[in-house]
Image: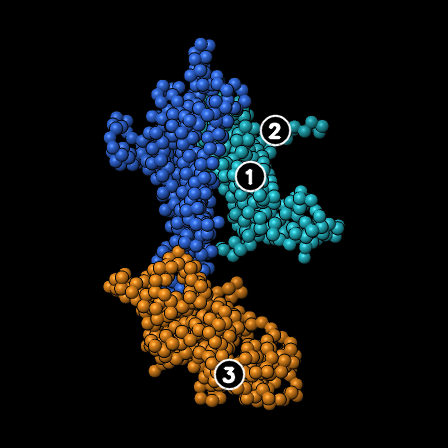
Chain colours: A orange, B cyan, C blue
Amino acid sequence: MSLLEIRDLKTYYRADGGWVRATDGVSLSIDRGETVGLVGESGSGKTTLAKSIIRLFPDNAEIHGGSIDYDGTEITDLSDKELRRRIRWQEISMIPQNAMNGFDPVYTVGQQIVQVIRHHEEGVSKADARDRARDLFDELGIEPDRIDDYPHQFSGGMAQRAMIALALALGPSLVLADEPTTALDVVIQDRILETIKEKQAEIDSAMIMITHDMSVVSETCDRIAVVYGGRIVEIADARTIITNPRHPYTLGLRNAFPDISDDDQELISIPGTPPDLVDPGEGCRFAPRCPFAEEDCWEITPEPQEYEPGHFVECHRADEIDYLQSAAGEKSTWQDATTGDRDAVVDGGIVDTSGADATETEGGSADE
Amino acid sequence: MSTDTDTTPQGAVTGLEKRIEQLRDGLGVFKGDRLGQIGIALVLVFVFVGVFARPITIEFLNVTIPGLAPHDPNARAVGGRLEPPSLAHPLGTTQLGRDVLSQLIAGTRVTLLVGSLAAFMAVFIGTNVGLISAYYGGWVDDVLMRITDIVYAVPFLPFAIVLVAIVGSSIVNIIGAIVLILWRSTARVIRSQVLSHKQRPYVESAEAIGASDVRIMYKHILPNVLPLAFLYAAFAVGYAVIAEASLSFLGFGDPNMLSWGEMIFTVYTADAIRQAWWWVFPPGIAITLFVMSVFFIGRTLEKVINPELRHQE
Amino acid sequence: MGLREFVVRRLVQLVFTFWAFFTLLFVLFRLVPGDPTSMFLLDGMTPEQREQRIAELGLDQPLHVQYVNYIEQLLTGDFGQSFIYREPVIDIIVVRFMNTIVLMGTALFFAYLIGVTFGALMGWWRGSRFERGGIIVTLVARSSPEFWVGIVLLSVFVFWLGWFPSSGMRTTGGELGGGFIQRYGSIDFLRHLFLPALTGAIVYLATPTLLMRSTMLDVLKADFVEIKKAEGLPEMTVLYKHAARNSVLPLVTVMAIATGAAMGGSVVIETVFNWPGMGREMVRAVNTNDYPIAMAAFFLMGSVVILMNFVADLAYVYLDPRVEYE
């Protein structure tokens, strides 16, 4: 049985014009020890999806439907108190984007680690909790004495390591990592990712890695879910998403990070902006920006289809995989797709197979 | 972009349009703000009452507009002593038989006078000090800011009491005492605002085309910090009115100008506070209402200046 | 710049501010328009008495000599003799000063305690009816002069309900002397203290409440608040131990200003409730031309404000580990 089972989850925000459907019918399951990447642009709903798992959202948001089964516990049914005591941090912890802001600036990092240990584990003395904090620092490659430093005394990379120490302090079974490396420079990014992976393997916890960066997920995740407009539009194992994606949006995202698909691929961005989630209406939510959108795409909401075992895609044209993959590699394809104009139907002329078999560039080569 | 530095008429027009745009924006905020509307409405009522409190004679038209006050506020024995409210005297009478309602209406004038004059002068001085201090920097800044620090060390009311006691209890001296202290906060806040504007491109380009210091300060920078000055003016009105009322209550008011604070002082000295609630409460409520309405306006102005606040509610 | 250097620089500034304040006092009390000596003289003095008094006070000396003497006297706590009490000013004023500190200290303590607590809640529950109501209540309180709040409380709790004594610091007949606890700890004293302290608390509540609310709104945007919630800490721990703890810093700086306001307010509140403190003494002194007392009271009030400014600066550095010493 999987560790986490999300079914048809709907998390909505109250706004002036009605409900913003930040997460609109998402299903996702995660196994123990597994790492799943949530990839999408900002505003796609990937962060809301992840935070919904511990119901961490502002007062104006609520879970409108669906279920979240965490290891036999229905999260949506828990009282706030139970959620805080049993689930948050104890079971599911979190690594924020910018660790420097993730720590309360007026307490030392050590005090904050000690606080969370002693809050969740009764009878742990302050001295013992401190020792554990020191050990964690040591394991993560930080001088143990630095637990008495204030957050602002750390460098960005060190702060992120300290944050990982905090996140792992209680040995959680699931870690939500929200763009854990985007605030750091590239060289440090890789080292931090490595550290995260190492520690995660050590304590055998599952992880959800939220990012807009395809290269990050390709290196770290077992599976990747591509999020667009509050839905998972494509999900498969990491290799399939990188080498053999079927959804035009995934293809577009891949173009935006050329180093992961093809060496001589140029960087192509997807024109247009994320959809209005207040009233998305019928049809595929990506249609207004999709260079391959047809009549059906505008009118019929696509259902997820399984193309290979575990590879689900929400796209009417997902079976035209060869054409999509080759055309998506051309810059002109995306430029021609004028946003929001449903009459701009793509002519199927350009077929070039060179982009079809992209080779994976596993592991990157960033030296320390 | 830098239309502010443009000295051609066209630039001026754009500047004007920008101002009008700002003004419209400001009024828009008032539209959505209940407290701000209440504030404006109340202040308008007070201004109306203050202006028409006593009969106004327009000489060349030979017309006299009758005053709102039913009686001469200083005339004794228009009623009995310490009469509770009645039809003849809706707010009762004082221990000398004066009409409380008439006194209340007449007192509005003093409040408006002190509030507006003191606030205007305090903000005028404060804005100039802040502007000059920040613009010139160096020793000018040092000297002006040390002076501001020292003024911050002076307790407001005790200072006003001593000053008024020494130079005499006239309305002019009272306003002077208030102004001497009240400018300090405006000076500090305008200074920090100007410091940030000094770095902006429009000031640099004005310097580049050789505009004089005075011109840069008053033509280019001042309009940008003026909204903040207005905000501080609104609060200054409130503080000035409270200060005047407190001074009068302590017996240091202008004996020739009947103010709300002085009314309460009289109740106190007449030892009538236990029985004559009709004489105590109206002036007290009037002070609170007036100050409250300028604070409400100030709060709304704050949102005009700092749009981020608009989403805070 | 190191902490030590910062403290030294602030100390130099402190001395300078004190000197400037002394000078201001001197100017205020000696160089005002009209006869500078008249305020040190009483009506009905014979010319000989006048001469003697002037010589006594050193008012026949050149101004700069007077100035030096004056500074010397202030530094040694010699404020001269009260014209009315015929006693050294320092003896009279010290007792009054203590009474004022007890009254205004209590008022400020509660104003800040309540202000911080409610301001934090108003920020936490932003957009709620609680917040909107709270803003209006605080604005109304802030719009009321001290004497007016005092009169309303007097009317309700004394004249109408009769729960509290109307004036003074203790019931007449109560012995003065005794230790601090006897003086300021008795039930009788606390009953007298309640209304004037409440008056001050109400009036000074607005600034910390509104400031606390607005800084809370800023702090609540910070990532760490979300992390602390994610850590499963109870809501009130996140609210008070983290969010409010971070929001409280700017309050430290306004505390100095609040003390200044309280010093001024003591003048009014003590008059309303007949509290035998420095503020009432000052009003009485000014009204009876007892200028040595008035000056000493003014001097002490200003000194408290200056010292509080200094303390606030240092406290800020102590409370915020991030602060750079400029």
Whether labels 2 and 3 share one chain: no
Give the labeled residue for mark 1. B144
Vertically, is B291 above or below B256?
Answer: below
What is the distance, in whole Å, between disc 1 and disc 3 at their CAs?
Answer: 65 Å
Which corner quadrant of the image does residue A151 belong to? bottom left
Give the percent coordinates (x, y) of residue C221. Answer: 46, 59
What chain is tagged by disc 1? Answer: B
Vertically, is A255 above or below B68?
Answer: below
Give the labeled residue for mark 2. B55
Q: Amino acid at mark 1?
A: Leu
What is the distance, in whole Å, between disc 2 and disc 3 at their CAs?
Answer: 92 Å
Left or right of residue B275: residue B239 = right
What is the distance, in whole Å, between disc 1 and disc 2 at their CAs?
Answer: 46 Å
Q: Secondary structure at mark 3?
A: loop
Count of residue discs: 3
As drawn, the label of residue A361 is: 3
Left or right of residue C205: residue B312 = right
Give the percent coordinates (x, y) of residue C172. Answer: 28, 27
Is residue C162 visible to us here?
no
Q: Residue at x 64, y 83 (%)?
A: A346
How packed is label 2: few (under 14 Cα within 10 Å), some, or many (20 or more)?
Answer: few
Q: Assign the N terminus of chain A to one quadrant of the image.
A: bottom left
Q: Amino acid at mark 3?
A: Thr
Name the mark nearer the viewer: 1 or 2. Answer: 1
Q: Residue at x 26, y 26 (%)?
A: C173
What chain is tagged by disc 2? Answer: B
Which corner quadrant of the image does residue B191 belong to? top right
Q: Secondary structure at mark 2?
A: loop
Q: Residue at x 52, y 18 (%)?
A: C35
How packed is label 1: few (under 14 Cα within 10 Å), some, or many (20 or more)?
Answer: some
